[in-house]
Image (tube, rainbow, N blue to C red):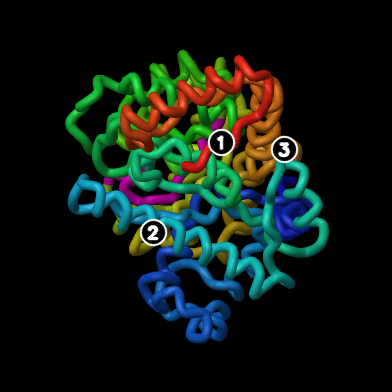
Amino acid sequence: MAPTPDEYLSQAHALLKRVPLVDGHNDFPYMIRGWFGNNFELFHPGIYNMPIGQTDLTRLRKGLIGGQFWSAFIPIPKTNDTLGKLECLIKTLQQIDTIHLMIENFSDHFGAVNSSKDIETIFKSGRIASLIGVEGLHQIADSTSVLRLFHKLGVRYITLCHDDDNRYADSSNGKSTNGGLSSYGLDIIREMNRIGMIVDLSHTTTETQKQVLSVSEAPVIFSHSSCNSLLPSPRNVTDEILDLLKTNNGLIMICFLPDLVSTNGVQGAMIDQVIDHIIYAGRRIGFEHVGIGSDFDGMLEGPKDLDDVSKYPKLVEKLFERGLSEDVVAQTLGGNVIRVLGEVEAVSRELKGHVPVLSDPIEEVWTSEQKDILTRMGTLRSSRGSGTNLAL
């Protein structure tokens, strides 16, 4: 006799208390920016019961989430000049700071993840393992130095682009400016591999995805995308790309956004359709390449029975109802993304001795006359065999 829905739900609660569910994408920090202006005096009581959106601490705890990639999202700047890029960068730093402040101010509930090994440790301590994602290379202000510094600030994945093309890659919502990756894009992938930054292919074109999967030495992810064969959309992933993702040992983290799972949008979106996408991807390329990437707080409304972060147990219940084993479900919930992060870290260690792939263009520091003086003094020092003091 098959278990009842209540029995499946009890099994789901038990599993979520034992293994971490790590969601690939949540825009809660942007809600903090929009509703509270990143003001923590206002946010402090609000975190427990947000009047808007799909996320707050009360619902997170009810949903038994074990880990979360918090998105430090800032929209593409209106102008692509230096001022526009710098404004976008400053706002991004504010969002990264907001995530850190949230973790620090509510340290009984959140823990900062620096490496893949931290996730399990933080989860076992009863807290939500917290990671940072940046949703678009437009947020690095065309600076590889910023990319590297973002990693030092705790960012562990960057989406190559968002709602338009940039100098590195083409967006699924863009004009295919680069024909996939530009030469800068090819180099940025190599640099992300070198420093241990996960490459996120959500929001990119199929051609961009093909090129990235042909050059990346580390596994890549789709942090919040679904399956094109079930719902054709430029934002969803084709079977061809899914097959290449398997070869790359990467991960598709299934998105709950109604437009990506239901032909009827919000009106027709239901939890069972999200389950359909999870199972389709798992049967196509193996459940070891499937994860969860809700995009909560990046949508106005979620699917029926999966409309906020408190509903993860219902998601797990449905996976059990569809006949998936506990091992497969545990893998899908968090084991796979922990593996990918660990493998990205391992590739970075292998590339540790390599010089940086990209460096920023630097303005002329010295005039030609000053360079001549430096050259002459260097020659003089060499001939004397001793150091020379030179006032710059």
Q: How far apart are marks 3 and 2 (CA)?
A: 46 Å
Residue that label 1 marks = 197
The region drawn magenta spans 251-263
Q: Looking at numbered disc 2 in the image, what kind of residue is underneath it?
A: Ile
Residue that label 2 marks = 90
Q: Is mark 1 on a helix, strand or loop?
A: loop
Residue that label 3 marks = 325
Q: Which of marks 3 and 1 is in front?
A: 1
Between 298 and 117, the one nearer to me in the picture:
117
| Sooner in the amino-acid sequence: mark 1 or mark 2 | 2
| Sooner in the amino-acid sequence: mark 3 or mark 2 | 2
Q: For label 1, count other residues whose C-alpha is less than 10 Å away and answer few (under 14), some (14-19) or many (20+).
A: many
Pinpoint residue 84: horizontal percent, then vertical percent. Answer: 25, 53
Which image quadrant is residue 208 in? top left
Q: Is residue 261 visible?
A: no
Q: Looking at numbered disc 1 in the image, what kind of residue is underneath it?
A: Met
Q: Is residue 260 magenta?
A: yes
Left or right of residue 79, residue 294 in this image: right
Q: Distance between the residues labelled 1 and 2?
A: 20 Å
| Sooner in the amino-acid sequence: mark 3 or mark 1 | 1
Q: Is residue 148 magenta?
A: no
